[in-house]
Amino acid sequence: MKHRLIILLTLLSGACQLPPRDQTRAAQNVPETALADPLTVDPNEEYVMVTTLINLPLYVRHDQAAFRRWGQKMGVKTSIVGPSEWDVPAQIETIEQVIASRPAGLLINGTDPGIAQVINKAVDAGIPTVVYDSDIPGSRRHAYLGSDWYMMGFLQGERVAQLTGGKGKVAALGVLGMSNMEAGFRGLRDALKKHPGIQFIGTFEDRANVEQAAKITSDLIAAYPDLAAVCGFTSSTGPGIALAVKESGKVGTIKITTVDCEPEHLDLVRQGVVQFLVGQKRELFTWYGAQILFDMVHRTNTFTRNDARAKVNPLPHSVNTGLVEIDRNNVDLFQNSGVAQ
């Protein structure tokens, strides 16, 4: 009996051990036809970014800089085009012109639901098309990359409740009608609903303009002497709100939360004018947006012999690139570039 037990244990011990990996033999068993040829990149291959506000510092420092770096690394051409103002019809016209030039891929800033039709036109023309920053309902874009704007608003609402002790009147400024900002406004309202002492007085259109944001905030301060907080949803909104609050002499009394973490935003936090920032990782959604366009062009991942004919989209449907929260406790960890170093 003892000998049988020893034999049984020996057999079980051997059965539980995986055989050694023979990587050489495994490689030799891979059919030669399954090995991909080295990737050849045409230096004339062109990827085009189309946006509005093409000279906006936020876009230049982050979106455009990352897009250009990506092109240099991959050895392809990159072009950045679009109107200098927040002009959606001009952006649509620009996209129309780019479609006619047949680029390898299109990276489009999702500015307004009205661009859905021209995005679909690009897709129908067989051009790989990715939307970033704000998704466009009704479009058949191949992929979307951006932040969770609902959470950007929700985080602002939670911080406002903390800063105000859950009491007072609160307003929000941004670009109305954009799907990302509407999601942000909804997140803000949902967070504030948990605090019956807070009265949300509404969302106001500033068209991503500092002067307009300052004027609206001044009007709100005049109309509501007990205004407790104002929340911003564009890169230009926060500085505009701050300007009006400083001019009214109510720094610290009126709390300010806003999006983005550009040098001026960081300085306003250091000065105690702005209390809270929710920043985006903009370099991620433009860099990886360009990369997945490249992957689609070069058929990095395919699922059928002809994905287009099979109506299979080889790209991720959407990518959430995450958020950064900044206040006086960690603002000094961020450099004047607006991104962590």
Image (tube, rainbow, N blue to C red):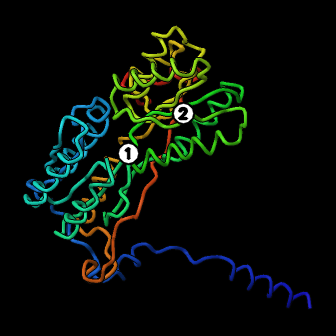
Q: Relative to the observer, which residue lies in front, 74 or 51? A: 51
Query: Residue at the location (17% across, 39% down)?
Result: 83
The N terminus appears in which quarter of the rendering?
bottom right
Structural crowding at the residue carrying mark 2, measured as other residues with C-alpha within 10 Å and reported as few (<14), some (14–19) or many (≥20): some
Amino acid carrying mark 2 in the image: Glu
Q: Are marks 1 and 2 in contact (CB under 8 Å)?
A: no
Query: Residue at the location (53% across, 37% down)?
Result: 202
Residue 62, by quadrant, is top left
Q: Position of residue 264 (x, y in %)?
A: 39, 20
Give the spatial CA distance, label 1 vs label 2: 16 Å
Amino acid carrying mark 1 in the image: Leu
Q: In the structure shown, which secondary structural element does the residue marked by tag 2 occupy?
A: strand
Q: In the structure shown, which secondary structural element does the residue marked by tag 1 occupy?
A: helix
Please give the label number shown on residue 74. Answer: none
Q: Give the vertical position of 309 relative to 181 (above or below).
A: below
| Residue picked out by circle 1 | 284
The first of marks 1 and 2 along the sequence is: 1
Relative to 229, 16 lies left or right: right
Relative to 211, 7 lies left or right: right
Q: Position of residue 260 (x, y in %)?
A: 43, 32
Q: Position of residue 138 (x, y in %)?
A: 35, 64
Q: Relative to the observer, which residue lies in front, 218 or 185? A: 218
Q: Position of residue 51 (x, y in %)?
A: 24, 44
- Tell which residue pokes out farthest to the right in this image: 1
Q: Give the vertical position of 297 relative to 335 (above or below).
A: below
| Residue picked out by circle 2 | 325
Query: Residue at the location (34% across, 78% down)?
Result: 303
Q: Relative to the observer, which residue lies in front, 341 or 49? A: 49
Structural crowding at the residue carrying mark 1, measured as other residues with C-alpha within 10 Å and reported as few (<14), some (14–19) or many (≥20): many
